[in-house]
Amino acid sequence: MIKMDEKSDSKTNSQTMYIPGDLKSSPLWRIKYRPLMLESIKIFYPKIYPQLKGYSKARNIPHLIFVGPEGSGKTLLAELLARELLQSEFSINYKLLFADDPIGKTERNESKKQGRISTRRIGSGAGTVRRFRPFIQMRVRPFLSNRKFGDAPFKILTIKNFHRLDIEQQAFRRLMEKYSNNCRIIIVTNKISGIIDPIISRCQLIMVPFLPSHLFNKLIKSICDKEKIDVKLDTLNYLNKITHFNIGKVLDMLQLTYLTYKAINIENISKMRSKLSSSLVKDLFIQTSKGKFPLIRRTLREIFKQKSLSKSEILIELSRVVIKLPLERKLRVLYLDLIATTDFESIESNDDEIQLNKLLSQMMLIGKEI
């Protein structure tokens, strides 16, 4: 019995020694209660957990693709698996990239600079210019090419929203083969149809569904209990509905509502939701009437960056704003038609931001005519 206790104690110490303590002291609930070990998600992902735990025990993984709806926990699962594999060297050997994060001017210029081969160089390549993709050249390749640190079996690169990449996906075929001994790539996507077949064939697919309603409610209720907040079942069901089972959004909404109204119920959550969405989208609409497209793009990117609203929520709220404002009947019909067309055309789109930029620019042209 004593030996078993000692063994379990050593196992617990080895698991907790690489968990950053500053995360648990964060004032944001979505960070404060973010799981940091695979064991924490065992009851919530009973079908996925054994596979991930098997990878952890084997200390090896293939290239992976986590597929599932937004907010289902794909990025979290990738991070937890990486923590188990890399342990104390996680922070050095792990990197998360967003495929839809805009490339800055500095990165573009540096990529072009690296593509120029000096005329002093010996060989047929002297003086030529190679066209490097900035995302690959400046963000992906440096991490892949540097050797792993310490005793970690390999490095792990997670790329979120991989389906947003276009021709750059072709380059990953070669990267996956060339650097496979040094680094594993985990792809996170909610649209598998946006990824080319050669990439899919090189990866193991892991389907991540939404949490079942009863497990989702259990998780949120446990967090509320820790914060000593009373929450009822009908309120939890309402949160599920308005956030589409997105855990991060639920925690943000709960925290904002509690800080504002000091009580969690359907009425207070509805007020907070209406306040948040209306103010953001109303600002967007007002900016279209002023014809300031750079400001419109900045506002839209900020909304996507903070994950405040999804494309569907923006379109729904835009239609509400158009209906409420005192506009001429023909103008209101024209705006609503544009919103409906965008909603229909964006079903198969790989990039929500492009579709919304198109809509807002059309609305801006109408606003200028007014």
Image (cartoon, rainbow, N blue to C red):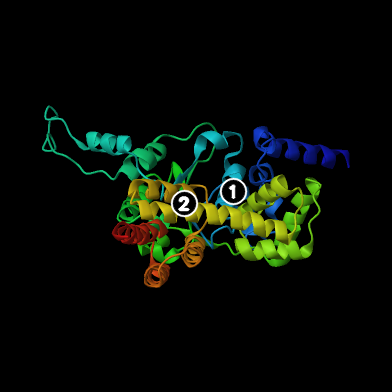
- Residue 23 visible somewhere in the drawing: yes
Q: Is residue 291 above or below residue 217?
A: above
Q: Nearer the viewer, mark 2 or mark 1?
A: 2
Residue type for callout 2:
Asp
* Position of residue 87 measured from the top left corner of the image (x, y, whole percent): 61, 38
Q: Which residue lies under the disc numbered 1? A: 81
Identify which residue, 208 or 28, lies in the foreground: 28
* Position of residue 269 measured from the top left corner of the image (x, y, whole percent): 68, 57
| SS of the residue under disc 2 | helix
Q: Is residue 333 left or right of residue 309?
A: left
Picture quarter containing residue 15? top right
| SS of the residue under disc 1 | helix
- Of mark 2 and mark 1, the one earlier in the sequence is 1
* Position of residue 95 measured from the top left corner of the image (x, y, whole percent): 49, 41
Q: Is residue 255 left or right of residue 131?
A: right
Q: Which image quarter holds the C terminus? A: bottom left
Q: Is residue 191 left or right of residue 211?
A: left
Find the distance from the CA under tag 2 to the CA under tag 1.
40 Å
Query: What label does residue 285 carry, if any?
Result: none
Q: Which residue lies under the disc numbered 2? A: 283
The residue at the point 35 percent across, 48 percent down is: 175
Residue type for callout 1:
Leu
Identify which residue, 1 or 110, lies in the foreground: 110
Identify which residue, 18 or 230, lies in the foreground: 230
The residue at the point 49 percent across, 67 percent down is: 323
